[in-house]
Image (cartoon, rainbow, N blue to C red):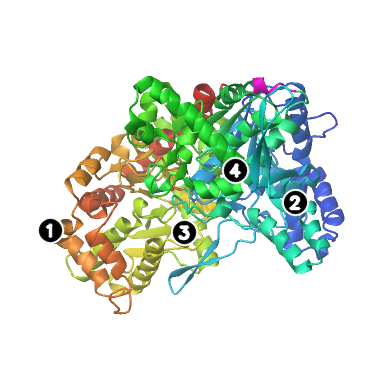
Amino acid sequence: RHIGPQWAPTHPVAKAPVGTPPPTVDGFVKEFLHELNSNQGVSLSDSSVNDQYMALASTVRNYLMARWLETERGNRENPSKGVAYLSAEYLLGRQLGNNLLSSGLIDIAEEALKQCGIDFAVLRSQEVEPGLGNGGLGRLAACFIDSLATMSVPCIGYGIRYEYGIFRQTFVDGRQVEQPDSWLALGCPWEFAHPEHGVQVNFGGRTEKSTDEQGKEKTTWIPDWNVIGVPYNYMVPGYLNGRVNTLRLWSAQATKAFDLQIFNSGDYATAVRAQTFAENISKVLYPEDSTPQGKELRLQQQYFFVACSLHDYIHHVLPEGFDLHQLDERIIFQLNDTHPVIAVPELMRILVDEEGFGFEEAWEVTQRCFAYTCHTLLPEALEVWPVEMLGRLLPRHLELIYAINDHFLEQVRERYGNDEMRVRRMSIIAEHPERSVRMAYLATIAGSKVNGVAALHSQLLRDKVLPDFSEFWPEKFTNVTNGVTPRRFVRLANRSLSTLISDSIGKGWVNNLERLRELEPYAEDPDFRKAFREVKAGNKQRLSKLLADRDEIVLPEGHMLDVMVKRLHEYKRQSLKLLHLVTLYNEIIEGRLDPDTLQGRTMVFGAKAAPGYKMAKDTIHLINKVAEVVNADERVKGKLFIAFPANYNVTLAEKLIPAADLSEQISLAGMEASGTGNMKFALNGALTIGTDDGANVEIREHVGDEHFFLFGMTEPEVADLGAKGYDPGSYYESDPRLKGAIDLIASGAFSGGDRRTFEPIVSNLLTQDRFMALADYASYMDAQERVEAYYADEDAWTRSAILNVARSGYFSSDRSMKDYIREIWHTTPVL
Ligand code: PLP
């Protein structure tokens, strides 16, 4: 009954540590029952689903443990340059399936559980995903650490163990209501706490200058208060290669010294409050995407996790006595957006104040040890901290930022003479509207490299966001197009497609995704196309069942599944999608469009709005209200259906994406840095309707124009229109279909006759429309008509869908990692 690993690895597998028996079903059953009894303290017959899930997780963990320890030993004994990925967010998704896949144990576990009378699927759905991120940025970090482990690159992911991750979204009368995400309530079997390795992190206070015996100036930071960061380690297993890297997330605890003082004063209540105050730092993820609010607690979180991480790396990972002048030979700290940028002055502080480096030599080392990834083009998304706040919380760091700035501006003056306008433009310190620290500038100045996340984005970053810097350091700027892990998003999420692919071209594609190219000839094979359609139909059925159970949504059968899932943001233009569907609805009920000429179409939305983002929340409300009306209207029955399951997260993405026919990637050109959802859809055989934005540009280049529905203005056209003066009202006046759709919303047709409910959305569209939905409307409607006609040709559509899969291998995060390694990190895999 021995079922070996399911997939033959394509590169050398690290030897299983001595004494590790090959996994067998019997062995797995034994281990599982042992865990159930001795860890959960229950017998099989008395165990709850949670007991069983915890025991299963522990069993898998035990199998990975020897490899984890082995990896650690290898890192210590044969150190080579590695990556410390600094990210305030990791949107991990559920761990069980991925860890089973990486250890080659899926089939064994399934069979073992069957023998115990347990349904594996039920246990998998017991896991609450750690939602420690907002969206694309956090999910990217999770894909990257998966790829690095798979490619045998030493990497530590550093981040924050938020007690509450991204909120759980519910709808009450169509409006978003946020619930706390208590993902730890039933315990998390994947983490290992190490309170004995707690790191003290200081805040506040002042600095003092002094001179030592040699006459050298010295600065001492005398902080006001501190907290302890407790590391929690998570396994990051490579795919069938025996390597297990580490993700280390920090949790804040009150320090003893801190509250003891207050306890001694007899004020018990204040002491307990102080404890809560300290622990607040890692309490909750800020549920924002793209628009930082400049809250002090957020800065505390950022400093907290990077201070812990740098300390941990220098004092626990590096061997004792390591010469920090050579730090860059061991590690590169990759800054995932500006959130961890305070690590730059923190490393300077360590080198100068603690290690006695001179400023210049510390700065040289620091510049070699950091690289910065920028994730945005929206000006409001570039993080700035008021000087007053930063100075109050981190007085020494502010001094160092000023020193770095002086040093840098001196170089600028040397190069350009006294071009004070330029100096002001490039200064880390902005003077208006209030004096503040521009974190993206600090990162750019400090980083050995600065990268954007798709070709177009990197170009715009150079030309529009940081033009002075790219002129100053042209060689510093580079591009690494984002990618997604095929393990989670194809192999695990789309098992039937994976089987079809493997049966056709072998199994090696899972960690060599370019091999999907070998599928191209199969697009011409009618039997393969039929099998491919069956896969899609099966995925739709599974999605239907899930949505029926999860959301009481009953999907119509046989529809095209048209999916727009991503954060709700004006720049992503869910409103444009709404205008498309309200137009179809309006044209049908007005008798101008014969519903019998339409394919049945189900439009699926999934989107969370930042709790303070009113326009985004209003848009969610409108989608839900349009859905209520449209879904109840007999005149469009069988033709139009709208589904908006609440709480879009990784777990739901894994079900939705494999079932989709059409992927909506419709941001205004020049606004979406990359997108990664777009890649996941293409890899799962959905066709994209999209603008020339972010990585859509590259997706279209790879899959071919005729297998992608392009619409909308290009980025230069958007810039021109903006410069000329954009008047959304003129589009409304001149396009009767558009006018009809907007008038229908304004009439109160979706709000029980109340014209005020959606007035803010309507007036925003007609008078501002910052992201030019109305300007792209006509082009979008045309593209949707092309979609409609193409979908009617089943064979042509399927052929295109297969070619999307075959030609999307480039979008593996393994390829992204190769690009980072070659262009930025200069690390080597450890085989
Ligand atoms: N949210 C979740 C749960 C995701 O899985 C993803 C990624 O693919 C995103 C957000 C990002 O989506 P997009 O790239 O479409 O903005």
- CB of residue at label 3: within 8 Å of ligand 1? no
Residue type at mark 1? Ser
> What residue sits 71% from the left and 64% below the top?
273
Q: Is residue 145 magenta?
A: no
Among the two numbered marks 1 and 2 on one chain, the one whose residue lies closer to the N terminus? 2
Q: What's the distance in space between the residues labelled 4 and 1, CA to CA? A: 58 Å
Other residues around mark 1 within 10 Å, as few (<14) / some (14–19) / many (≥20): few
- CB of residue at label 2: within 8 Å of ligand 1? no
> What residue sits 75% from the left and 51% below the top?
56
Q: Quadrant of residue 148?
A: top right
Residue type at mark 3? Ala
Of the numbered discs in the image, which one, if any, rests on residue 610?
3
Of the numbered discs in the image, which one, if any, rests on residue 55?
none
Residue type at mark 2? Leu
Of the numbered discs in the image, which one, if any, rests on residue 734?
1
Residue type at mark 4? Pro
Among the two numbered marks 4 and 1 on one chain, the one whose residue lies closer to the N terminus? 4
Of the numbered discs in the image, which one, if any, rests on residue 56?
2
User: From which residue to which does the magenta span run?
Assistant: 322-327
